[in-house]
């Protein structure tokens, strides 16, 4: 690498020392140096434009493919392409054989008709991943012997054991089904739509966008869930079916009275006798959740005891404005939030998940955010007034225990490997009103996708209550 | 739109590669660079309405862009940096470097087109690396940590990619000259 390239890389990284900047400047005092710099900067700028154009091209191609998956694979078009093949085959056999051989040609055409237009029902729909112990696949009323890869066909039923669950992955789309132990599920494909029957147990699903007009239909003894593409959990017992949605929208219909509710991310509904069919928040008082700032996709959160799964989009939480999903409680006076991050699923290295204290729910509110990045770095970000600053405070291996405490105008960040021994990671003075918002924050750094974080041991403690 | 504004706008758009190279080269943040570029046009349109004709539009735009960049740095509360006379001298030199390039024939549109083709042909892994650097604006240290590589390896990969792209562009321009 030439000295200029080295200086340029450092300039781009904003890591030039005073001496290096002086060296760079001296270097620019010659016309040759300036001409070279102009070329380099022009190349950089042109490269940025080319990369953005390429990114846009790829996104457009991806959207086109998704559209094709959704629309083109529908039966009419698919049948159309088969008919085209058939027509070509007829033309081919007629031109080759001539009309004298009309009868054998007609027989060939009939055979081709059967081959090309036969229903695709016998093609595998999905496969069971790994070899989960105790799981049984039933086809035509008989258990299927396990082979290397267990393919699931339309009409098959999967029964998990009382001890183990199983994962089912669809073959032609990125849909996955997680079956808890003691679950019985039947898979079927009719026309262009998937139809599932969950007769017992719990199913957690990530469903890829389904073709327009052909939603995935899931039947339980009490309800129908009509799914267009989403992430949800559906649990069935003898009395009720409960649907919890983390991402997207599901239409949930009570089979007994036909009443339905649209359940969106962060909400649940129950189908049972005597229970009103309505979407309710997955969070119970005193917990609430909402997106802060203009995020590209709506986030959601689900809390079970002190375990919280939160999904959030958003470009960032720094400088002057924030975009993230916030799961919070109101707090009067002093207090603290503690949580352990047990899982972090982010497609972007800029993603963040952690504990937050904010003065308000506005995008530019004073705040403190102690968070973990996907690369394992822990940072403490704080915005006393207009603009936030971030300090790297550690690079911790899991588990990640984070704690943020407010006492008067002072906010202190702590880290711990076990939730017992806490190390002070930083402290700032931020003047906030007496009433603040305290809880968990998640941002994917990508407005086109949601990042997911699972926290446990979540607790908010008020000192002055 | 008046005829004068139309003419000024046409020239402004035609000189986008040079002006953006100047702005982006200094601020190193795509969105901020775009904001400053648009702000320059607003000021240019305002100047056309209220003041005398601008003699050297490219020079005028660069001067306005430079002030906006310094203002942006001040708003970032990096007052220490802005007060640094070496940095101000550096910015002046960068401005001079682009002023000296105004008269040169750099074949900007051809180069841009060739570069787009070269970028399209890159492997996905290389595109991802370049996007992390240029689009997301991550430092080489952050990229290295994300990719679980050393910073030196990331820098080396970036420098090699730039060299490969520059060679690819030159080849394409040569072929274009030969009419192939």
Image: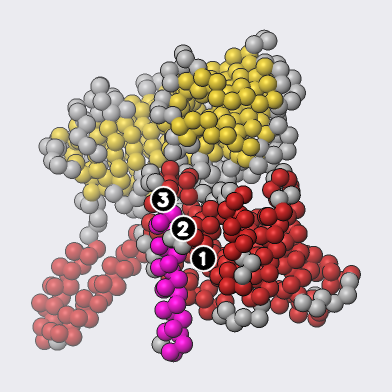
Residue at (43, 48) in percent of width and height? B151
Please name the predominant secondary structure of the magenta segment in the image.
helix
Left or right? Give the position of A45 relative to A194.
right
Residue at (38, 33) in percent of width and height? A204
Q: Is residue B3 above or below residue A306?
A: below
Q: Indicate which disc residue B130 carries.
A: 2
User: How far is disc 3 from disc 1 in space, using C-alphas?
Assistant: 21 Å
Q: Indicate which disc residue B152 carries.
A: 3
- Quarter of the image with the C terminus of chain A is top right
Q: Indicate which disc residue A186 carries.
A: none
User: How far is disc 2 from disc 3 in space, using C-alphas?
Assistant: 15 Å
Camera-side residue: A25 or A99? Answer: A25
Location of residue A115 in the rendering, given as x and y in whole percent from the top left corner: 18, 64
Q: Is residue A16 visible?
A: yes
Residue at (59, 51) in percent of width and height? A19
Left or right? Give the position of A145 relative to A12.
left
- Is B39 within the magenta? no
Location of residue A233 in the rendering, given as x and y in whole percent from the top left corner: 42, 32
Viewer-nearest of discs 3 and 1: 3
The quarter holding residue A21 reads bottom right
Are dots 3 and 1 in contact, CB under 8 Å?
no
Q: Which residues are magenta?
A: B154-179
Q: Name the residue beneath numbered marker 1.
A: A47
Q: Is residue B127 visible?
A: no
Q: Chain of mark 2?
A: B
């Amino acid at each position: 690498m030439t000295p200029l390239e080295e200086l340029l890389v450092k300039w781009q990284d904003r890591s030039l020392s005073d001496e290096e900047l002086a060296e760079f400047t001296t270097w620019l005092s010659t016309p040759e140096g300036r001409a070279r710099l102009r070329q380099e900067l022009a190349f950089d700028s042109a490269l940025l434009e080319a990369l953005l154009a390429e990114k846009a091209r790829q996104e457009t191609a991806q959207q086109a493919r998704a559209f094709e998956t959704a629309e083109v694979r529908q039966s009419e078009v698919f049948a159309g392409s088969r008919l085209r093949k058939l027509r070509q085959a007829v033309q081919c056999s007629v031109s080759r054989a001539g009309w004298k051989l009309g009868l054998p040609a007609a027989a060939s055409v009939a055979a081709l008709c059967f081959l090309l237009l036969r229903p695709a029902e016998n093609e595998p729909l999905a496969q069971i991943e790994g070899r989960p112990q105790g799981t049984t696949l039933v086809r035509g009323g008989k258990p299927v012997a396990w082979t290397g890869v267990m393919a699931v066909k339309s009409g098959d039923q999967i029964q998990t054991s009382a001890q183990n669950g199983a994962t089912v992955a669809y073959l032609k789309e990125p849909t996955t089904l997680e079956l808890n132990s003691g679950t019985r599920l039947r898979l079927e494909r009719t026309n262009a739509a998937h139809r599932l029957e969950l007769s017992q147990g719990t199913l957690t699903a990530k469903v890829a966008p389904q073709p327009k007009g052909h939603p995935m239909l899931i039947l339980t003894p009490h309800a129908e869930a009509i799914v267009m593409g989403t992430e949800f959990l559906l649990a069935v017992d003898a009395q009720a079916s409960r649907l919890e949605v983390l991402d997207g929208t599901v239409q949930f219909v009570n089979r007994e009275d036909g009443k339905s509710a649209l359940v969106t991310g962060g909400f649940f509904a129950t189908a049972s006798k005597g229970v009103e069919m309505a979407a309710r928040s997955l969070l119970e008082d005193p917990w609430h959740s909402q997106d802060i700032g203009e995020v590209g996709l709506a986030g959601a959160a689900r809390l079970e005891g002190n375990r919280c799964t939160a999904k959030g989009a958003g470009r960032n939480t720094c400088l002057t404005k924030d975009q993230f999903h916030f799961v919070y409680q109101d707090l009067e006076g002093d207090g603290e939030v503690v949580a352990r991050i047990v899982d972090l699923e982010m497609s972007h290295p800029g993603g963040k998940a952690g504990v937050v204290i904010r003065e308000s729910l506005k995008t530019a509110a004073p705040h403190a955010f102690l968070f973990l990045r996907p690369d394992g770095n822990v940072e403490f970000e704080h915005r006393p007034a207009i603009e936030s600053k971030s300090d790297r405070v550690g690079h911790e291996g899991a588990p990640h225990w984070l704690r943020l405490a407010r006492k008067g105008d002072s906010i202190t960040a702590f880290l711990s490997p076990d939730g017992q021994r806490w190390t002070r990671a930083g402290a700032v003075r931020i003047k906030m009103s007496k009433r603040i918002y305290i809880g968990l924050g998640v941002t994917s750094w990508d407005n086109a996708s949601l990042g997911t974080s699972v926290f446990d041991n979540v607790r908010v403690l008020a000192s002055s209550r | 739109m008046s005829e004068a504004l139309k003419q000024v706008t046409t020239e402004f758009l035609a000189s986008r590669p040079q002006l953006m190279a100047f702005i982006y080269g200094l601020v190193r943040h795509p969105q901020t660079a775009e904001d400053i570029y648009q702000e320059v046009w607003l000021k240019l349109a305002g100047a056309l309405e209220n003041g005398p004709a601008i003699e050297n539009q490219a020079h005028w735009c660069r001067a306005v862009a430079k002030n906006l960049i310094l203002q942006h740095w001040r708003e970032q509360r990096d007052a220490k940096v802005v007060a640094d006379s070496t940095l101000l001298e550096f910015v002046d030199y960068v401005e001079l470097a682009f002023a000296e390039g105004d008269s040169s024939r750099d074949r900007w549109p051809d180069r841009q087109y060739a570069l787009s083709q070269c970028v399209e042909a890159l492997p996905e892994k290389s595109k991802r690396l370049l996007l992390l650097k240029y689009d997301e604006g991550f430092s080489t240290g952050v990229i290295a940590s994300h990719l679980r590589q050393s910073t030196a390896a990331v820098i080396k990969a970036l420098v090699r990619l730039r060299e490969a792209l520059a060679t690819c562009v030159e080849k394409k321009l040569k072929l274009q000259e030969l009419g192939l």
